[in-house]
Image: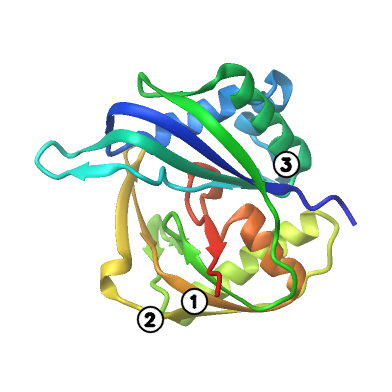
Amino acid sequence: MPSEGGRLSLRFFAEGRLPVTYREGLQAALYQALPLPLGQRLHDGGLLEGHRPLKLFVFSRLQGLLYLREEKAFLAQGELVLHFASALPEVVEGLGKGVWERGGLEVHGLFLRLLGMDLDPLPEGGDLVVEALSPITAYRTEGGRTLYFNPLNREFALLLEANLVRKAQLLGLEAGSLALKPVGFRPQHKRVERYKDTWIEGWMGRYRLEGSPHLIRLALLTGLGAKNSQGFGFVREVKG
């Protein structure tokens, strides 16, 4: 079985503003922090299965930003936390080293000064309740149209399971199965966010994951749903 990768919690200090579309700049900064050959390979396609790229990493929103409704921007005014995870140990190690050597990350001209980082252990056992720290998106493309699904739609859970099975098979693991159920679903959990001129629908909230332990661990290391390397689908276990 291949090494299982890991998770980092990165703590920064910053004062300034970020656009609502800061996710694009954050993704670019993460690629730049990786060693050049690895960062370039991931940027250009990552690990491939046929014609569909799988990059096997995911990151959260920046925790600690204040939304300025009138300016349609985010205010950084102190400590921020970024969670990052990957099923590839070289990606976790490379990112941690790169951010450390740079002393932080520059996102849309705002420097996030590194305060510290922690390697977060993975929980032991199987079934978990997780919370989305960035929106989970599930969709199909039919006839040139993109159809998004919400957590109450059966297709939502099926797409998330299929995505994890595909990741597992690429890593040489058995397929397995996973059931996902929303916990305390609310319509307010819906998010519509822009990424490179494309509007993407996703869902925050909490979810119970039941099934194959290796798929649950992959959900924590690579994200749930689509567009993980763009910062969608980062989930973290709810303690207690």
Evaluate whether residue 5 shows in this view: yes
Color encoding of the figure: rainbow
Please name the residue shown 66% across and 64% down the image. 164
Residue extending farthest right: 1
Q: Position of residue 110 (x, y in %)?
A: 36, 22
Residue 118 found in image quarter: top right
- Whether the residues at callouts 2 and 1 have beta carbons within 8 Å, the answer is no
Give the quarter of the figure containing the N terminus: bottom right
Mark 3: amino acid: Leu
How far, Cα to Cα, is label 2 from label 3?
A: 36 Å
Q: Which residue is mark 1?
A: 155
How far, Cα to Cα, is label 3 from label 1?
A: 26 Å
How far, Cα to Cα, is label 2 from label 1?
A: 19 Å
Q: Mark 3 vs mark 1: which is more N-terminal?
A: 3
User: Is label 2 or label 3 in front?
Assistant: 2
Give the quarter of the figure containing the C terminus: bottom right
Q: Position of residue 174 (x, y in %)?
A: 83, 68
Q: Mark 2 vs mark 1: which is more N-terminal?
A: 1
- Observer-nearest of 115 and 75: 115
Q: Which residue is mark 3?
A: 47
